Amino acid sequence: MKPFKVTSTFEVYESIEELPEVIRDLMKQAMRARDNAYAPYSQFKVGAALVLNNNEVVTGSNQENASYPSGLCAERTAIYYAGAKYPEAQINYMVVSAKSMKHKVDAPVPPCGACRQALVEYEVKQKSEIPVFFMGESGQVMKANSIKDLLPLMFDKTAL
């Protein structure tokens, strides 16, 4: 046996005000999408926004269902819509913001595992990295330069 070490490096911004203006504006769109989330069961609202290389902005929010597996996260709502409406476009970057209706979320909230897997599919498809900025409702914002930083031992088409 020999050890196998995996590391990821993230950038940390102390607040949304430290972000580059274009990312800050995109995060505000994600926050608006978050506030429109349908989350009556978890009381946990998430909004996502992404910019495509054709300059289109696509937003998404989580959509829950009483049959829990039937809901969809904000990140997948946004990327699947982008993939359906702009199939040839590439994702330049994505931002995510989360808010609980039960308590204050002031720590960064990264995409869930299912969203990471969906995002890596698009990163592999477009053959370029997708930077992701993520935060709670306030506080620090983290940036992953690639989905591979969030899912380093990714499963993709090369395994099939």
Image (cartoon, rainbow, N blue to C red):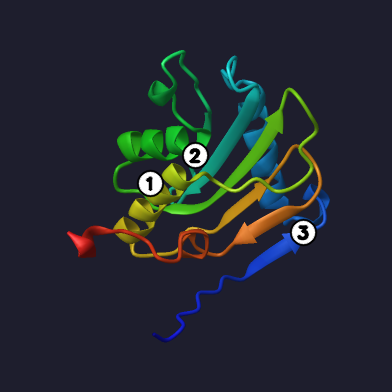
- Quadrant in which residue 29 is drawn: top right
Disc 1 from disc 2: Cα separation = 9 Å
Among numbered discs 1 and 2, the one appearing first in the sequence: 2
Mark 3–mark 2 contact, CB under 8 Å?
Answer: no
Q: How many marks?
A: 3
Location of the N terminus (image quadrant): bottom left
Name the kind of residue labelled 1 in the image. Ala
Name the kind of residue labelled 3 in the image. Tyr
Viewer-closest of 129 and 119: 119
Residue at (44, 32) in percent of width and height: 77
Name the kind of residue labelled 2 in the image. Glu
Disc 3 from disc 2: Cα separation = 21 Å
Residue underneath mark 3: 13
124 left or right of 99 in image: left
Among numbered discs 3 and 1, the one appearing first in the sequence: 3
Secondary structure at badge 2 equals helix
Residue 153 horizontal/vertical position (percent): 40, 65
Report the disc number at residue 8. none
Residue 149 horizontal/vertical position (percent): 52, 65
Among numbered discs 3 and 2, the one appearing first in the sequence: 3
Residue underneath mark 2: 75
For the residue carrying disc 1, how many other residues have a C-alpha within 10 Å: few (<14), some (14-19), or many (20+)?
Answer: some
Disc 3 from disc 1: Cα separation = 25 Å
Secondary structure at badge 3 equals strand
Report the disc number at residue 118. 1
Residue 41 vs 149, above or below: the answer is: above
Residue 1 vs 109, above or below: the answer is: below
113 left or right of 159 in image: right
